[in-house]
Amino acid sequence: MRYTAEEQVRLARDPGRPGAADYIGALFTDFFEQRGDRQCREDGSILGGIARFHGRPVTVLGHRKGRDLQENLTANFGMPGPEGYRKAQRIMAQAEKFRRPVITFVDTPGAYPGKEAEERGQGEAIAQCIAHMSALTVPTVAVITGEGGSGGALALAVANRVLMLEHAVYSVLSPEGFASILWKDAARSGEACEVMKLTARDLYQGGIVQRVLREPEGGAHRDWAAVFAAVDAALTRELEALDKLGGKALAQQRYQMFRAMGQNLPPAGEEVL
């Protein structure tokens, strides 16, 4: 079944979709969470640590949303502050030191835009996180599992391979924000969804993501096991391919891939695998 862009936004935001903690629990073993940015405080909206993927030590990071009000408050509704991005940088630096691949799960409406976050260096923290991930010399794979909103998402998505679930979305800002800015009318968000080209199919065809992973009919929340199996197989395949590159070649490949986005377009008809 083909969904409209507006319908896919609703699917991407469905609270029943598996989140970072669910993927980590299903796909990895021996997960050891690391907390705190060593400057200010712990940010519950970024979950990260070390784990094993099919026995291989890896570093795993992801945006965390809540299932109920208390969890939403703890995770700030999936909107990290600067502390979350500084924590991510710390965990990535450790991955670089110990030569562990980095796997990220992206699902955020965007970084927290509040005044207090800006006072504590939100913009600088996101920029440094992007720069840090860009320069890693270990394999990196990002999976956009739900919403990929603006720089808050990009900070965990500067990877050698960017994968995307079939009904996830990835955009410079929310459709509501887009409509409010362009047309001064947030009620036109449905129209904005079509204009923004934010679906997985659009982004694959535009060369922004490298692989789209099929979801069960009706969305990822309908069959978690099937989604976990698809993500597991994709991660295995991508890491095997990236292992053939080494050190600085990984950073160079990542740089060239992002520089070429929108230019080297993929073959037609192969977007969902």
Image (cartoon, rainbow, N blue to C red):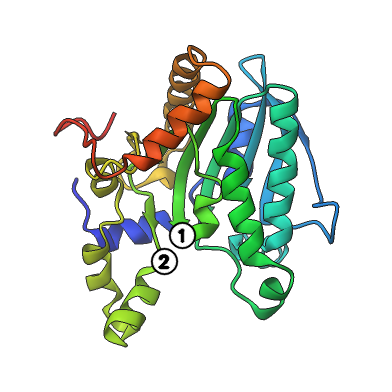
Q: Is residue 75 left or right of residue 264?
A: right
Residue at 83%, 60% (x, y): give it: 41
Query: Which quarter of the figure is the N terminus placed in?
Result: top left
Q: Residue at x 35, y 60 (%)?
A: 9
Q: Which mark is residue 149?
A: 1
Q: Which quadrant would residue 116 be assigned to in this image?
A: bottom right
Alpha carbon separation for disc pair 2 and 1? 6 Å
- Which amino acid, by three-letter code, is at mark 2? Leu
Q: Indicate the secondary structure of the residue bearing disc 1.
A: strand
Q: Position of residue 11 (x, y in %)?
A: 37, 55
Q: Given the image, on which type of amino acid does mark 1 rest?
A: Gly
Residue found at x 60% / y 57% = 126
Image position of 99 (left or right of 164): right
Residue in the foreground of this view, choosing between 259 and 23: 259
Query: In the image, is residue 86 above or below residue 32?
Result: below
Residue 7 in the image: state x and y as whole percent: 28, 60
Residue 49 at what x, y percent from top left? 73, 36
Question: Total number of numbered labels?
Answer: 2
Q: Residues within 10 Å of mark 1 (few under 14, many from 20)?
A: many
Residue in view at x 35 percent, y 81 percent:
181
Instruction: Determine which of the numbered discs, if any, sits on residue 173 in the image.
Output: 2
Q: Secondary structure at mark 2?
A: loop
Q: Percent x, y for residue 4?
A: 21, 58
Mark earlier in primary sequence (2, 1): 1
Q: Are marks 2 and 1 in contact (CB under 8 Å)?
A: yes
